[in-house]
Image (cartoon, rainbow, N blue to C red):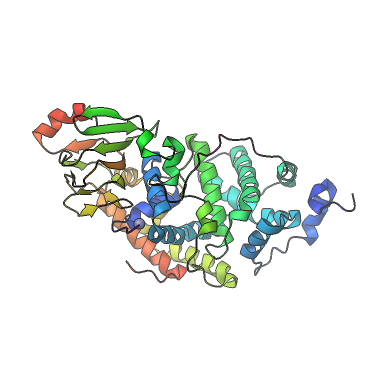
Amino acid sequence: MQDKPPGDNVDNVVAMKVEATPEAQGNDWSAMLAELGQSRDRQLFIQLFRHFAPRIKGYIIRLGLTEATAEELTQETMLSLWRKAHLYNRDKAAASTWIYTLARNQSIDWMRKQKYPEYDLESWHRDEGEPLQESEAEQSIVSDRVALAIHQLPDNQAQVIYMSFYEGRTHSEIAERLSIPLGSVKSRIRLAAEKLKLVLGGDYEY
Amino acid sequence: MNIKHHLDEATLFSYVAGALGQGTALVVACHVSQCEYCRDRARQLEAIGGALLENNSLSPVSDNALLQVLERLDVRPQATAAAPAHAADSEVPGPLASYIGDSLDEVAWKRLVAGVWVYDLPAQGKGLTRLLRVAPGKAALPHSHRGSELTQLLRGSFIDEVGRFCPGDVADLDDRITHQPLVDSEHDCICLIATEFPLRYTTLLGKLAQPLFGF
Ligand SMILES: [Zn+2]
């Protein structure tokens, strides 16, 4: 038993909870995820699990799925993280961003019983070009700023973000529900996206 | 690929949020897979999802769940049907290749009227998702939409009130626009179309022809 990685032993894993969860700020999750893709180190995986699994599950529950389903889909998401970690490119996105797409796809596939069309995970790996992210250390700050920015959006813009990300409603469905024209839905989304992207620090021009 | 027509920001946003119908999501994925500009924009928007995930209220996950996952790490996933071989420079975008394979010439086209063929993709939820092949010089009926229509150009070209569309371009139209695309390429024009609701025709002829045209 001695020479096995900690993840292979049930007792170790439980015991490890105390020492191996530097839950504190400043953990570079993106570096850890990239490292996992190379090393397939179970201890790293466990750390990522402890940080992200409760967040993934929280997201899925907000989508309106039951506790049991959320638990199952969280496990599936973490498994796909393990299997696809080698495709992750930290120059392209923060770990939380990449993991969000995994959790989203897992949930939608389950709800629709149909695969959500992906634009090719391979391209995360393959793509050349400028890195999008600011320095890794800033990532958690960026997340906080986005959350804050969402709180500061006018209600009608925060509402369309919520209806899109958590209720999965199409533009037409939102229009119908709010009794506003389709064009208004789109412009609210555009305005909200614009503000949030400013916070994200992209220098994009449209 | 010299792409001139891109996705609307609101469309891309909803795709990233997981809030597009299956068919429109497929067209978006096809465009994004071919368009570096929209791919960068999509990643920017995905960071919103990442921030939401990071700041979500946490829901406790038991150690038991962790153990169950650890036990499965070494289990190979069930062999899913092998993804069809897909060349990076194929005119069939990757997300579409999983439906029709890697060649537009092997599609089981169904003739609608002279010069117009369609191939409907399997169950995509509300609305229509189909490949459309139109002979040179043919025009589609003038129509507008209740809901959205997305068209990804795969081969040939067409021209309409908005501009000229070539392979890689996407026409992302909303319900304010009435348009009548005309195929102006030498060979057949092939595109992937997803509509959220059935199209509505703006002329009497259109209304009469609608059942025939099958839109
Ligand atoms: Zn584009």
Q: Nearer the viewer, residue B184 or A139?
A: B184
The quarter of the picture where the C terminus of chain B appears is top left
Q: Nearer the viewer, residue B45 or B109?
A: B109
Query: In the image, residue B86 lies at what x, y percent?
Result: 48, 44
In reply to whether residue B79 is colored magenta, the answer given is yes
What residue occupies the far left of the structure in this picture?
Answer: B204
Split into quadrants, the picture shows ligand 1 in the one at: bottom left
Compared to residue A98, the image places residue A206 above or below, namely below
Q: Is residue B56 visible?
A: no
> Would residue B140 appear left or right of A111 to someone viewing this image?
left
Query: Residue at 41% of width from left, 69% of height from top?
Result: A198
Query: In the image, residue B122 lies at what x, y percent?
Result: 40, 31
Q: Is residue B121 visible?
A: yes
Query: Which residues lie in the magenta part?
Result: B77-85
> Would residue A118 appear left or right of A77 to someone viewing this image?
left
Query: In the image, residue B133 lies at what x, y percent?
Result: 27, 37
Compared to residue A130, the image places residue A175 above or below, namely above
The quarter of the picture where the N terminus of chain B appears is bottom left
Query: Residue at 16% of width from left, 44% of height from top?
Result: B180
In reply to whether residue A121 is colored magenta, the answer given is no
Query: In the image, residue B193 lies at what x, y percent?
Result: 31, 41
Q: Nearer the viewer, residue B180 or A142?
A: B180
Q: Nearer the viewer, residue B59 or B88?
A: B88
- Count of residue discs: 0
Q: Quadrant of residue A25?
A: bottom right
> Would residue A195 appear left or right of A14 to someone viewing this image?
left
Q: Give the overall secondary structure of the magenta segment.
A: loop
Query: Residue at 39% of width from left, 56% of height from top?
Result: B35
